[in-house]
Amino acid sequence: MVTGAIIITPLSAQTQDEKGFVTAKSDPSSSFVQGTCWALLVGIADYPQVEGFEIQPLKSPVKDVNNLAAFLKSPRSGGCFDDEHVFTLTDEEATRLNILATLNDIARRAAPEDMVIFYFSGHGTYHSEHKMTYLIPYDHHLDRWDLETTCINFYNLSRKLHAMEAKKIVTILDACRSGGIKEEGSRATPRSELNKLYMEAFAEAEGRPLLLSSGEKQDSWEDEKGGIFTQFLLKGLGGEADKSVKGNNDGIVTFEELFHYLQKTVPEYTKKYFPRVQKPTRRYAPGEVEGDIPLAINWSAHDEFRQELKDQLDERSQAIFLASRKGLDETLKEFSLKVAKSAHDKALTSEELTDQEELLLTEMDLLQSGKITVDDYIQRARVIYNMGPVPLATRVEQVLEHKPVASPDREEAPPDKPEISYDTQKKSRLRAPMRRLTAGLKAGLCISRFRGNYWDDLEPKIGFCGGGFITGNINSILAIQPEILFVMKGAEEPDDYEVELNYLEIPVLIKLSMPGGVVDPKLFLGPAFAMKLISNEVYEDGYWVEIDYLTDIDFGLVIGAGIDLDTGYGKIMIEARYTLGLVTIKDEEGYDIENDVISFMAGYSF
């Protein structure tokens, strides 16, 4: 490294000039995909000081870049990047010119089937007048007060990334205030079977997600080991994300698995050890998103999975061998062992079992666990053996086609009763209970907020609420009133960020009226059951992301008061109510979010 020199880092020469084609290494794990994985990792810890600014030195960015580069280049750890396609720029190497020039070179080489990762660890700043975030390179010249010329405008950077032909581009920012980004207009042993799964997921996925180390107006914390976000990023890529609550433990770490892992672990850790919580966020750039981008391979989970399958095969085989000593004939024995081995092989390649195999494996597991006898197994296995490989659904259809459909003679249904006219109803004895039911419509505004330890820094949000109701009057004072309402809940940071939650809410209220003539005051109380319809994070520029980590059900208690104005034909209603959330809507241990809503509505009952 030459101190103070301007270094332009070109991409390494390829064995072919054609875009996207590289020579594979001898390591079989390096050729997972038909395409190339590129990475530009930038870390700046030791910023030069300039007059008029105090730039805080950082401990972790260079260490973070080196650790991430080592992971991406290590097939055994789970990385899938060739050494010559991982570019690192740290401290004085990370000038504005070098960063943009290296990105240009990657853009020139990257093919549609390739994947590109851009990682930046350092300082960022937000220009409130222009509402734009800038990444600060090593040669920033902040003293000139010209961010556009001396720093990296993230909007321009994102345009450069989006202009690449590669359809899988992941941007990861571990910078102070990284959540403030706004984009204009956007919303060693052979493992061939796992390589195949990774390759299939890689080929199917498209998208340009952004992973940000912190939320709006939050700090990104670090300690002597490195940036907290990047520490957990590496743990997640190393397999923890695949094994987490939102992971499927299939041996492949995807972008969404990684985000959900970071969203849980980083806030928990920073809440415990730092003054304020740091909450990673993610967004998707405009354009179509298909599939979930695979980022790494969790070899440990894959090896555990293989061992579990081997143990299962051994247990099933042992049960069959023992049964052969107690009367299981050779034909059924060989058939059973063949199905057990087929189930093992198909599980490794995610191939579906036939109905015949599924039925026999169920009986085999019952035999192995001692829940059925050998004689029971012999009888059932013989039936399954004779049914052949024809799908079970087809067998059922064949049986149904020959099943008699005639049914015993039944008495003819009595002729329809003559329709009762409205006038007849009025004169009938049914008139009294029917008079006790009224129905109506109501609508208005609601003010919602969150209560708990998550999103507690957001301000109340105004939305719409409205729907219909039926009132069953027990007497002139007491009534039961079920309702069906559409309610817009959530919270916001004005002119910047909004959590949008829409619910279909069903309150069941006990209404206490105080008849007094034309104007009747009323009080009501009761539970409210709600089903989530929409849950989005909406940003100032119209950019939105669906929230998939909230529960689908909410439950609260409604307390309210109002007046009814009798018009002679119906009643005009004016009311105010408070809905107190009783359950958390974030279904993860350690988090607590309740919906609280104040509503003002007017309506008419018929």
Image: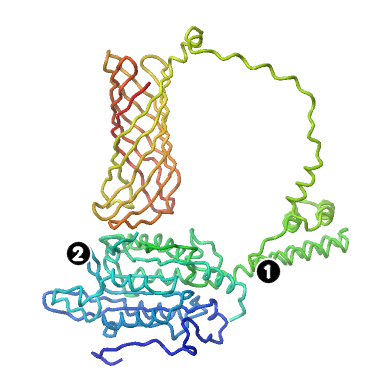
Q: Is residue 24 above or below residue 162?
A: below
Say whether residue 481 is left or right of residue 462. right
Return the residue found at the far left. Answer: 52
Report the residue marked by disc 2.
130
- Residue 133 locus on image (x, y percent): 25, 67
User: Which of 556 and 383 lies nearest the eye of the viewer?
Assistant: 383
Q: Is residue 312 above or below residue 144?
A: above
Q: Do callouts 1 and 2 mark residues in contact (Cβ within 8 Å)?
A: no
Front in this rendered view, residue 478 or 354: 354
Q: Callout 1: 10 Å neighbours few (<14), some, many (20+)?
A: some
Residue 348: where, in percent of width, then height? 64, 68
Mark 1 lies on a secondary structure that is: helix
* Sequence-earlier tag: 1 or 2: 2
- Taking the image as shown, residue 104 lies to the left or right of residue 168, namely left
From what the image shows, is residue 440 above or below residue 100?
A: above
The image quarter in which residue 581 lies: top left
Q: Quadrant of the C terminus?
A: top left
Q: Is residue 417 left or right of residue 520?
A: right
- 10 Å crowding of disc 2: few (<14), some (14-19), many (20+): few
Helix, strand, or loop for circle 2? loop
Count the labels in the image: 2
- Residue most toward the bottom? 2
Q: Residue furthest top?
A: 427
| Image coords of residue 408 (percent x, y) | 80, 26
Q: Going 25% across and 74% down the picture, which residue do you hit? A: 152
Specify the color scheme: rainbow
Q: What residue type is disc 2 on?
A: His
Q: Which mark is residue 310?
A: 1
For the N terminus, which image quadrant? bottom left
Give the quadrant of residue 340.
bottom right
Q: Give the amino acid type for the residue marked by disc 1 in the picture.
A: Lys
Q: Nearer the viewer, residue 176 or 419?
A: 419
